[in-house]
Amino acid sequence: MIARVWRGITHRDSAAAYLAYLNGVVLPGVAGQPGQRGGWALQRFQGERAEFVVLTLWDSMDAIRDWAGGDADKAVYTAEEAQYLLDQEGLVRHYEIVGAVTTPP
């Protein structure tokens, strides 16, 4: 399994709106793609900025390539994200999942 990790930064004042957009549009748009196995949006504040990390899980790099349009290392953005993000980083990071821990219910 592959973890795809992307980072974006907004102004603190835009953080709530961007988080709503991530949860309402971006993550649901990724969910259900072939080979996609879930994901999380993480947030932290640093002064007047908010940093978001989106971590999605995929079966393989081929599944990511199919979704991303061929170049798995290129970040994928919707047109609307430009109104929130201070910078649109071009690259993402991929990690092979080699260990895990879960807590039983």
Image (cartoon, grey):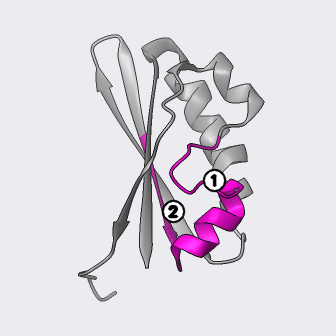
Q: Height in image: 102 above or below 8?
A: below
Q: Which residues are magenta?
A: 53-76
Local SS, label 1: helix
Q: Position of residue 4 (x, y in %)?
A: 45, 59
Q: Residue at x 60, y 54 (%)?
A: 71
Residue 63 vertical placement versus 4 (above, below): below
Q: Nearer the viewer, residue 103 or 99?
A: 99
Q: Which residue is painted at 66% across and 21% down in the image?
A: 82
- Classify 10 Å Cα crowding around label 1: few (below 14), some (14-19), many (20 and above): some
| Residue type at the position of mark 1 | Leu
SS at circle 2: strand
* Residue 41 on image: x %, y %: 47, 49
Picture coordinates of residue 39 (x, y %)?
Answer: 51, 62
Image position of 55 with respect to 81: above or below:
below
Residue where numbered disc 2 is placed = 39
Indicate whether residue 54 is drawn in magenta. Answer: yes
Identify the residue under disc 1.
Answer: 27
As for residue 104 lying within the magenta part, the answer is no
Tags 2 and 1 in contact by the CB under 8 Å rule? Answer: yes
Which of 19/78 is in front? 78
